[in-house]
Image (tube, coloured by chain):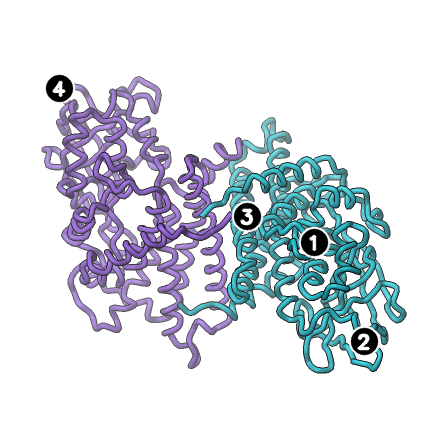
Chain colours: A purple, B cyan
Amino acid sequence: MNLEFTAEEQAFRREVRDFLATGLPDDIRERVRLGRRLSADDHLRWQDSLSVRGWLGVNWPQEHGGPGWGPVERHIFEEECAAAHAPTIVPFGVSMVAPVIMKFGSETQKRHYVPRILSNQDWWCQGYSEPGAGSDLASLRTRAVRDGDEYVVTGQKSWTTLGQHANMMFCLVRTDPEAKKQAGISFLLIDMETPGISVRPIITLDGAHEVNEVFLDEVRVPVANRIGEEGQGWTCAKFLLTHERTGIAGLGHAKQALRHLKSVALEIQHRGRPLLEQPHFRQRVVKAEIELMALEVTHLRVLAAARDGGAPGAESSLLKVRGSELRQELSELTRRALGPQALPFFPDHLYGDQELEREEAEHAALGAQYFNRRKLSIYGGSNEIQKSIVAKTLLGM
Amino acid sequence: MNFAYSDEQRMLADTLERLVADQAPTETDALHGEPSPLWGTFAELGLLQLPFTEEAGGLGGDGIDVMIVMQALGRGLVREPYLAGLLLPGTLLARLADAPQRERWLAPLLEGELRLALAWQETAARYDAHAIATCARRQADGWIIEGAKQVVIAAPSATALLVSARVDDGTLGVFLVPADSPGLERRDYPTLDDQIASDVQLKGVALPHDARLGEDAAEALAEVLALGRAALCAEAVGAMEAACDQTLAYLKERRQFGTPLASFQVLQHRMVDMHLNLEQARSMAILAAASLERPSDERDYRVAAAKAYCGEAARFVAEQAIQLHGAMGMTEECRISHYARHLVMFDHHLGDVDHHLEFVSEGLSAA
């Protein structure tokens, strides 16, 4: 038993670091560091840079143009990206729909969509949740009625992240209202330019436009855009959800957040001394640091199991719960560290191009970020759902 | 990066699992005086030699081997003083003793012929191994030890104690004090976690020159305490495993309102929280065991973090195990209560959560 990375893995880490030093545009790095919203173009410039390097399809096999990394390489890559203030790869195309198309798509679909994802030609968004179907996703009501070679889709999707930039949406629709819940669902690929689709922003409690509502009003979708058989959508959806999702613990982000917290708490003064020396505050930082140590080893245990052929199942739910709690605690401590400085709110700076004085910009995002991080325990299956998954699958309750 | 056991370790774990499963809970009284038959089995299986270097007559086991043993003992709630009677005093002895001292004390220890105990704690020093008042004065014909030691686990069954004392030249000394030395007085008692211990008075105990083990023992003692803390974490993980298993089984079997308790979501989530604590604590126990060969700063930082983390996790698991067993969990008859006592009192051995959090806090890197 040993916890060390091999010489090859360490060399790989250096390779990633070297790439990030030149491959990540400085203006993007700075925006991420300051917690400012990226434009669609920012995302694309970064993902193009990865694409050229051959590193965009992080979880893809080589035959489809991925780097063929194992779980350990992916972990190292994610950790280094977070440390370098690289944007998170927009997951909906690369990490979510691509594996589904590779697994369940026809040859024609694979040939058409997969290369377009790798070259950033398509921006995908996710049409899963609905106003009436959140944790209980299978109760979704968006209808798709067959009409010749087309489906006519009507309904409403919600919490569609970055849908404002997307030209494609993968969507769960009900094709058979008579069948039992899961059995009547199909998986469709929908062009966002199709008449009848409208996207409306949802502004979240941090003032950000990150998620959207998507309205579908008699949208005509070719049957050829269905993945798998009619009624097989739930299988695709489950595959997507249980498909090994690297970075579910957000370990790289948590490490970066802890470093950031320490730097803020060293800079902020409390009675003439750095706040980090204030015993009560320091104690909470210490506890977060120790929780992070435990999370990292647990994460490495899961990675090693995945590398050796084990399927990470319920363990990733454990990582998700503890990882999100830790990241929320770190965002809470960082907000508190600022004291009164956490109050000023400059949405035009955070989400637009308004510039602030350098010093003000350094801390401008931290108050709002706390609110943004509340999503971590809600999305991707809320922490309560994760616990129920563990209770059922791991503990047999 | 590899978390799998070697073939030998797998065999060791299997052997221990069988051994522990066959054991009836150890009665505290049986631990007085003579070693129990189980200690002989430990000797036969090589467990007494396992954690010592080959050069010291052992099998050269590492931190992970010790973790495997302790985890099994914790799982079975085996109260033989493997840690207090063998591991702590033995590894300190092996680290400091010269050849004649090893011959006289270490060899029989590894054969299971005698047991030792490590007397390092003092009332005023709490968990601090250095701020001690017991002192050793050099005499023409040897040493005089004066002082008092508190809660020396396994002392009643020890042939001799390893006693830490401040030497008149300012160094930290460790002395081998036979249990029958004139001036050594013991008050024996059971502990809340079913072990035996003593408070020890040392009133002008006269010892020969060769009673001192090595010279300044500060680094050796730190090393041994790190090993002990890592071992305790592993033992707690084993006990947490058992407590989680028993609680889960109880929730599935016990019916109220016409349905198993396991069908209530509020209890399911509590059970998952116990499991989360167990798995995170397991990670920290692994980290501690794998860090024992690291430079002392890094070793002690990680071990302290692990001991603090496991202390909180163990208490959480214990309290929830009692709660989820309902009134049954309050009874001595129910096995879970013994695990709960063990898991809570684990925090009082070799430094508690506060002690270790303070240590981590002092060593916290600003980057």
Q: Left or right: where does residue B8 sit relative to residue A306?
A: right
Q: CA distance from mark 2 to mark 1?
A: 33 Å
Q: Earlier in the sequence, mark 2 or mark 3?
A: 2
Q: Are marks 2 and 1 on the same chain?
A: yes
Q: CA distance from mark 4 to mark 3?
A: 56 Å
Q: Which mark is residue B282?
A: 3
Q: Position of residue B107 (x, y in %)?
A: 76, 55
Q: Earlier in the sequence, mark 2 or mark 1?
A: 1
Q: Position of residue B11 (x, y in %)?
A: 61, 38
Q: Are marks 4 and 1 in contact (CB under 8 Å)?
A: no
Would you name the residue on which mark 4 appears? A149
Relative to residue B233, is residue B170 depicted above or below? below
Q: Mark 1 Cα within 10 Å, few/some/many (few <14, many 20+)?
A: some
Name the chain letter of the residue that bears numbered label 4. A
For mark 1, give the secondary structure.
Answer: loop
Toward the viewer: A376 or B145?
A: B145
Q: Position of residue A235 (x, y in %)?
A: 32, 26
Kind of residue sitting beneath label 3: Arg
Kind of residue sitting beneath label 2: Glu
Relative to residue A307, is residue A293 depicted above or below? below
- Residue at 65% x, 48% y is B70
Kind of residue sitting beneath label 1: Gly
Name the chain letter of the residue that bears numbered label 1. B
Q: CA distance from mark 2 to mark 4?
A: 96 Å
For mark 2, give the secondary structure.
Answer: strand
